[in-house]
Amino acid sequence: MIMQAEGRLFITGNSSGLGYALTRHYLEQDWHVHGCSRRGCEGLGGFLSDMRMDLTDFEAIPVCLDDLLGAADELDLVILNAGILGEIRDIATTPLADIQRIMNSNVWANKVILDWLIHSGLDVTQIIMISSGASVLGNRGWGGYALSKAAINMLAKLYASEMPGTHIVSLAPGLIDSDMMSYLCEEADAGKFPALNRLREARKSEAMQTPAEAAQNIASVIEELRGFESGSFVDIRQILAPDLYASLYGK
Ligand SMILES: NC(=O)c1ccc[n+]([C@@H]2O[C@H](COP(=O)([O-])OP(=O)(O)OC[C@H]3O[C@@H](n4cnc5c(N)ncnc54)[C@H](OP(=O)(O)O)[C@@H]3O)[C@@H](O)[C@H]2O)c1
């Protein structure tokens, strides 16, 4: 008997952190997961189609997506998760090339993917673009990353009006103890950039999610996200931890 997948997910950046945990979560739910990253996602069973892809190679993306998704005719969920942080430093001293590198990974790669999805004619039910609280908080030091995530929020809004059959949100997933967080908590200069102290305190508490917890939390709000207007920016804490959300955003 041929097993039927419960759903179909395309996710970017699934070799580590949140992307790996989401891949694992959906495979465990018997979904067919199509994933991509540079390092690849290994050691997981189930319906996994995985491809090594550098999302900053814009010309290669459509060719790789033809291979990875060409046989599919619909996707229940797309999670545009891949992202880089860059160095925590003042924006005035950050070379433009560093900011452009972050924008290429975090923003323009997603534009190329979204354009491919539109032109492929694939039926896509829901897209989650992984954003960050940094997209609105504007803390000193988060320069290129904050700019890129603010652009993600606007990209979600713009594409929402051009993809009326697809529900899109940009989603801040809360704090996650990934490689990115290790840099923020262990290497970046908390003396100069005090917003790092909140992360370091959170790392000692339940406010810091493991990647598996973050994946579980995102999966638990998938339906609820569709109650927001397509194109919205949503911070998962406004759904799951309203007090934390209020104190973070001063609401
Ligand atoms: N950690 C947090 O607290 C936090 C908070 C808010 C938002 N986020 C967001 O959550 C997402 C996942 O981050 P994470 O914390 O899980 O960090 P992570 O462990 O560093 O994961 C980043 C993922 O992005 C992939 N990636 C980066 N550049 C790529 C490229 N050029 N081509 C293909 N894949 C690329 C990486 O794969 P390869 O290196 O194998 O290519 C990796 O799988 C990011 O968008 C991040 O901004 C994280």
Image: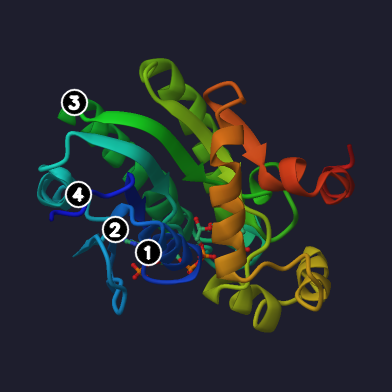
User: Residue 56 or 12: which is nearer the viewer?
Assistant: 12
How many other residues sit within 10 Å of disc 2, few (<14), some (14-19) or many (≥20)? many
Q: Which residue is mark 3?
A: 121
Q: Residue at x 13, y 55 (%)?
A: 1
Location of residue 151 in the rendering, given as x and y in whole percent from the top left corner: 52, 38
Disc on the earlier residue, 1 or 3: 1
SS under mark 1: loop
Report whether 196 appears left or right of 214: right
Mark-to-mark CA distance, 1 and 3: 24 Å
Location of residue 21 in the rendering, given as x and y in whole percent from the top left corner: 47, 66
Q: Is residue 45 visible?
A: yes
Label placed on residue 14 = 1
Q: Where 172 sits versus 167, above or below?
A: below
Mark-to-mark CA distance, 1 and 2: 6 Å
Q: Residue at x 65, y 73 (%)?
A: 184
How many other residues sit within 10 Å of disc 3, few (<14), some (14-19) or many (≥20)? few
Q: Which residue is mark 2?
A: 35
Disc on the earlier residue, 2 or 3: 2
Q: Which residue is mark 4?
A: 61
Disc on the earlier residue, 1 or 2: 1
Disc on the earlier residue, 4 or 2: 2
Disc on the earlier residue, 4 or 3: 4
Mark 1 in CB contact with mark 2 (< 8 angstroms): yes
User: Residue 154 or 209: which is nearer the viewer?
Assistant: 209
Location of residue 10 in the rendering, given as x and y in whole percent from the top left corner: 31, 48
User: What's the amino acid at mark 1?
Assistant: Asn
CB at disc 1 and ligand 1 closer than 8 Å = yes
CB at disc 4 and ligand 1 closer than 8 Å = no
